[in-house]
Amino acid sequence: MHIYPDAKAVVRDLAPDEPVILNRPHAARRAARFFTEKFPGKVMYAVKANPAPDLIQVLWEAGVTHYDVASIAEVRLVREALPEADLCFMHPIKTRKTIAEAYFKHGVKTFSLDTHEELAKIVEACSDPETGAPAQDLRLCVRLRVSSEHAQLSLAAKFGCDLTEAPALLQEARQHCDWLGVCFHVGSQAMTPFAFVQAMDRTRAAIAEASVVIDMIDVGGGFPSVYPGMEPPPLEDYFAIIARHFESLPIAYNAELWCEPGRALCAEYSSMIVQVTKRRGEELYINDGAYGALYDAAHVDWRFPVRALEDDLRDPEMDFAFYGPTCDDADYMQGPFPLPGDIKAGDYIEIGMLGAYGAAMKTGFNGFGDAECVVVADEPMMSLFIGERKVVQSDNVVSLR
Ligand SMILES: *Cc1c(COP(=O)(O)O)cnc(C)c1O
């Protein structure tokens, strides 16, 4: 496989008309090793953040053995890529057919749930189709609703049972499995480790009230990456607080601790080259946007690091907004994205930190969606895992520390 040194080399070689996704396997490997070495428990990758088979392979080789899948397509995809991986179905709402295919065909034993109805569905779908005998090897995980107040993106409204419902559901689930866990999600890009303290306190209350043996605590995802204007404390601080609170939970002496990161494992994996197709004052029209890898830039005003790839731009930086390629006013990203003041149509830009919920979000809406993927060897534009967490090789992003 050809490996380019960096984005400029890709532009020189391809002069691409369409966006190009630049993948950095070494960055994903570094993130995975960081988690598998430093998190005081098991690390499960949340596949929805980026389901690229190449990435999944890199994570597996770096020691990530468990995969959080949320749809039958994710189950099939990861099973195909990793025949040996442990797949856990962590979406609390599934169809009967999906559960049965996951269990009987793909060896999925671990399922999350947040209602009695879902529990009954899982038990029925996994029982022997001939004899009706219940499955003996189910591993169930009750999803608790916890606050998302410390996260940039909430996951609090949709899933999870309340503290009032949790004890009865835990007791009922305990009747159907030999291995029972509690899971939650504090919201994506949690900017302080304190987010996990509140969630662990709720977990403690639910378990104490239920008085059942708990074999596993899954603290979910939410571990942050780094973006302009969003510089989180070190991940070690999150791990230390989680470990401390885990130690004091009323659970089985051999209970396992799991985490389920998406973003933190893959944000640094990808960036993207886009081309300016038109300039109108402080607005740049580019060839990717709200329906492409820049979904979050448009829909939740996420700021990604940017840099111009031309060598002949001389003017000081100014703040730009972007328009994406589709014929739709909503295809707009307010940024601000700081770039040289003399940037113009035809110039190329690299947009960083798109490995999580970026490259994976591309659609073909309006005929814009094609993107070649290439591998590059340079470092991501920002990193949580390099040195003292300094911004790497870019003068277009705010510098950290
Ligand atoms: C999205 C999701 C994750 C990953 O969240 P990040 O914020 O990307 O770490 C983990 N678990 C579940 C159940 C999810 O829905």
Image (spheres, rainbow, N blue to C red):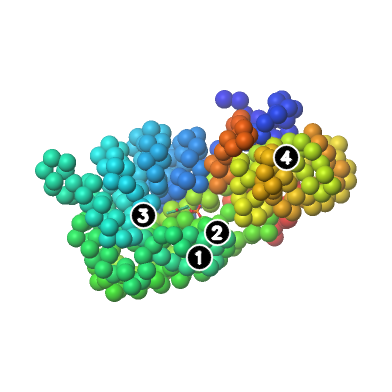
Q: Amino acid at mark 3?
A: Pro
Pointer 2 or 4: first along the chain? 2
Query: Residue 134 at what x, y percent from top left?
Result: 16, 49
Q: Quadrant of residue 4?
A: top right
Q: Are marks 2 and 1 in contact (CB under 8 Å)?
A: yes
Q: Which mark is residue 153?
A: 2
> Mark 4 highlights which residue?
286
Residue 302 position within the rendered picture, expressed as x and y whole percent measured from the top left: 64, 54
Q: Nearer the viewer, mark 3 or mark 1?
A: 3
Horizontal arrangement in the rendering, residue 155 relative to residue 41 (left or right): right
| Crowd rating for badge 3 (residues with CA inside 10 Å; few <14, some 14–19, many 20+) | some
Name the residue: 62% across, 32% down. Answer: 367
The mark nearer the N terminus, 3 or 1, is: 3
Above-or-below relation of 388 to 322: below
Disc 2 crowd rating (10 Å Cα; few below 14, some 14-19, many 20+) is some
The part of the image, by quadrant, that contains residue 286 is top right
Residue, x 45% and y 45% (percent of image)? 47
Q: Amino acid at mark 4?
A: Ile
Mark 2 close to ligand 1, CB under 8 Å: yes
Q: Are marks 3 and 1 in contact (CB under 8 Å)?
A: no
Marks 4 and 3: CB-CB under 8 Å?
Answer: no
**Residue holding disc 1:** 148
Of the image marks 2 and 1, the number of the one nearer the N terminus: 1
Query: For mark 3, what is the residue?
Result: 92
Q: Which comes sooner in the sequence, label 3 or label 2?
A: 3
Dot 1 amino acid type: Ser
N-terminal-most mark, 4 or 3: 3
Residue located farthest toward the left when viewing the structure as drawn? 131
Count neighbours of disc 1 (C-alpha within 10 A) and say few if under 14, some if 14 to 19, many if 20 or more: many
